[in-house]
Image (spheres, rainbow, N blue to C red):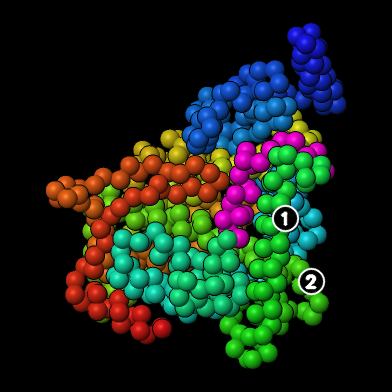
Amino acid sequence: MAFNLAYTLALVCAYFALRRFMRRSTQQGSLMFPGPTPLPIVGNALSLPSQKVWIKLAEFAKLYGSIYALRLFGRQIVVLNSPEVARELLEGNSATVYTNRPLPKIIELAGFDKGVVLEHDLGKLRLARKLLHSVLQPKQMPLYHEALDYHINTFLRNLSQDPDDFSQHIHHLTAGINIEVSHGYRVKSRDDSYVGKANVFGENFARATLHNGHIVNWLPFLAYLPTFLPGMGWKARARAWRDQYISLAQEGHEMVKDDIAKGTARPSLTLTALEESEPGLYPDETIMFTATQVYAGGGDTTSSILTSFVLLMVQYPETQKRAQDEIDRAIGPGRLPGLSDRSNLHYVDAIVTEVARLRPPIPILPRLAARDEVYNGCLIEDNAYVMMNFWAMLHDEDRYEDPHAFKPERWLGIEERDANHHPLEIVFGFGRRVCPGRYLAEETLFAAIARVLAVFNISHAEDSKGNPIIPSGDTTNGGITCPVPFTCKIRPRSPAAAELVQRSFEDVA
């Protein structure tokens, strides 16, 4: 048995050595990217932590530069650590090579590859993104301002009534906005049945995209084995996810059709696709799944930034006070700030920018190379993961002074955004997969943050002895990160502020 094991390992090592030799021979003159030396078979797997791998990747960037490569079990991982390199690769002449995202087998089995987020068919992807652009481009944003007012003012009312549950209120806010933008459906209560179904889909989608959590992603042949075999429970789970996704997409689609027939349809992606576009331009499947993924694609990232904002206001009370003073001077106590006030609230706008820089909701995000490609004389292999390391880009000491400190003032006095420096030009991605909802996200973040600052004070919670409870400031692990759960105290700034919250809610209810 020992001989058989040694023989098998020798064959595996020989396979990987031959594979690398053959690849090098097909690209004469190509160099290897800098990076840590890989071990046989496992590559650099033992050098990477199981938690918050982006921090280790950022440390490697200090050693190996703006682009380097790792190897994991035979697959090349090319890490991009500067916006300049990312734009050159993902937006330049070879942009189509890096359009797709990795597609774990569990995603395919669950049907989540239907829709814009993980679609690999370039024709379908192009059509879905055309639809999203038609609905979410800047000139379309005024269509959704009434919806933003409703959901943000409802959020303020919920905060005033139950401030301890602020995290759930944030989630409800972003879910409500995204569902209204995708389907024109207005959420009226926290126990709304459609929101419940959408939340189930969001949870399933998040579980499916945890690549390491599913054995079939590493051993794809398991997908073809019978379900009755031991250890095949994941197949039934994937089928249930698929059925729930299709049912939710169909329900939302039919709901909008009914609203159109009744003459009650609100502005939405689905309404635009069905009513205002060239007849037959968008197949029903494209409309259904693209609209449904608008919820999964944007809600959690916006929620993460808003939750980070609350945490940072607890940690930096002087920043909060400076922003409140700016609002008081520019707006006064009689109304809430609006999007039209953004040009007069420079410090509040700087807070939005700095929160996104300091705590990006998606620290790393991969693309998939469609073929061998040579960049600066080095080979990017076919099927390599090309990893955008947003964390490294936004915490680069050569780009940002004191990058781990929260300093909104660093963004004051900047007239134009530098695409390779301004966080809101980086955090939403690059190239053909740049987040199509970035303009909606920016407006949501500014309006919500400005209004919270206008009417609430955020401070440390206290224990039974009156001592402040200091949040750890740590983040969760995963594709989308968020501050770990923490407590804080959120109270109206004054009786007049409490009255303004209630009055503003009644105005939109």
As drawn, the label of residue 228 is none
Whether 221 is among the magenta residues is yes
Calculate the distance from the C-alpha at mark 2 to the C-alpha at mark 1: 24 Å
Q: Amino acid at mark 1?
A: Arg
Instruction: Name the chief secondary structure element in magenta.
Output: helix
Q: Residue 76 in the image: state x and y as whole percent.
A: 70, 30
Q: Amino acid at mark 2?
A: Pro
User: In front: 225, or 230?
Assistant: 230
Q: Which residue is mark 2?
A: 283
The quadrant in which residue 471 appears is top left
Whether 9 is among the magenta residues is no
Q: What secondary structure is marked by label 2?
A: loop
Q: Which residue is mark 1?
A: 239
Q: What secondary structure is marked by label 1?
A: helix
Q: Is 469 rendered above or below residue 396?
A: below
Comparing labels 2 and 1, the label whose residue is closer to the camera: 1
Quick check: 465 left or right of 295?
Answer: left
Quick check: 504 left or right of 430?
Answer: left
Q: Residue 74 in the image: state x and y as whole percent.
A: 73, 27
Q: Is 177 rendered above or below residue 483?
A: below
| Residue at left offset 72%, top offset 30% | 75
Q: Quadrant of the C terminus?
A: bottom left
Quick check: 488 left or right of 128?
Answer: left
| Residue at left offset 35%, top offset 84% | 506
User: In front: 69, or 480?
Assistant: 480
